[in-house]
Image (cartoon, rainbow, N blue to C red):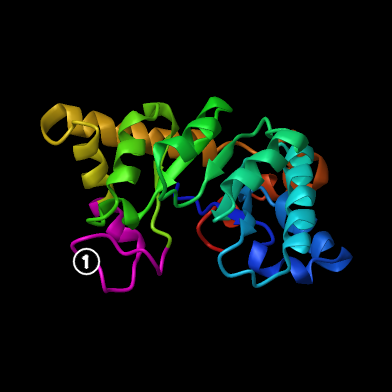
Amino acid sequence: MPRVRIAAGCHPHNAKHYDDALEAELYRLLADPRTCAVGEVGLDYHYDFSPRADQIAVFRRQIALAHETRLPLVLHLREAHEEAYRIMTEEGFPEGGVLLHCFNLDWDTLAPWLDKGCYAAFGGSLTFKKSDDTREAARRMPLGRILTETDAPYMTPEPMRGMECGPDHVIFTAERLAEVRGCETGPAKLEFLADIYRNALDLLNREPTAWQLEHGGAAQVAAGPSGPWGTSQ
């Protein structure tokens, strides 16, 4: 049966709006068994749409939510990887896992996160002509930690760059990833694509956590095909 999985979190752009009411709503969303992760959360020091002190405080709070709910944490980091890594080390890396969303930097930036067991998702920027450093990072990282993504409606991959990005465009990113990993053709390519698909399922398509079942998820799961796990809502 097709499933829609959801990540719920306060993006760093909106950290200045985080309050008790928003957190209460976030708790409600995280208890929904369709919710597979806390995210995307983190730090964005490029735009600074929220003050950095607010971004840091809200980031810490949502790391704590990932620990409490046992859900993976999906990170949006821009010009803030070192700061975020320091904070994550202080707060602890959640047992549910950590995903670096839309990673587009180099191996030296990625390696410390991999040492902590994190995943990295590659979007269309992997295909850009100037992304040799990112491709090298993808080539060197463990196969079991690689995911793809769209970052829709942004980061449309080559050769479709300039169009609005959509889920179907991930095939171009996956194609380039296969080339980077030396799996361009035949059975090796099919096996590689199956592996990264399994990575996504393993991280983001799990059964509800014990916390979710304790906080209302059990009743929703029991609703059956017409409920949250089905396709009718």
Give the labeled residue for mark 1.
Answer: 160
Give the residue drawn at x 58%, y 56%: 226
Q: Give the mark count.
A: 1
**Which region shows up in magenta?**
152-172
Residue located 59% across and 52% down the image: 80
Describe the element under mark 1 as helix, strand or loop: loop
Classed neighbour count for the residue bearing mark 1: other residues with Cα under 10 Å, few (<14), some (14–19), many (≥20):
few
Q: Residue furthest left?
A: 186
Query: Along the horizontal axis of the image, is 91 left or right of 221?
Result: right
Q: How far across and down, in percent of the image, does residue 211 sit? A: 78, 38
Please say whether residue 225 is visible from this viewpoint.
Answer: no
Residue at position x 54%, y 34% in the image: 113
Q: Nearer the viewer, residue 123 or 49?
A: 49
Q: Is residue 110 above or below residue 216?
A: above
Q: Is residue 79 magenta?
A: no
Residue that appears at 42% across and 47% down: 105
In the image, 118 versus 186, the foreground residue is 118
Verify whether residue 161 appears in magenta. yes
Q: Quadrant of the C terminus?
A: bottom right
In percent of width and height, residue 13 lies at 64, 68
Image vertical order of residue 49 relative to residue 93, above or below:
below
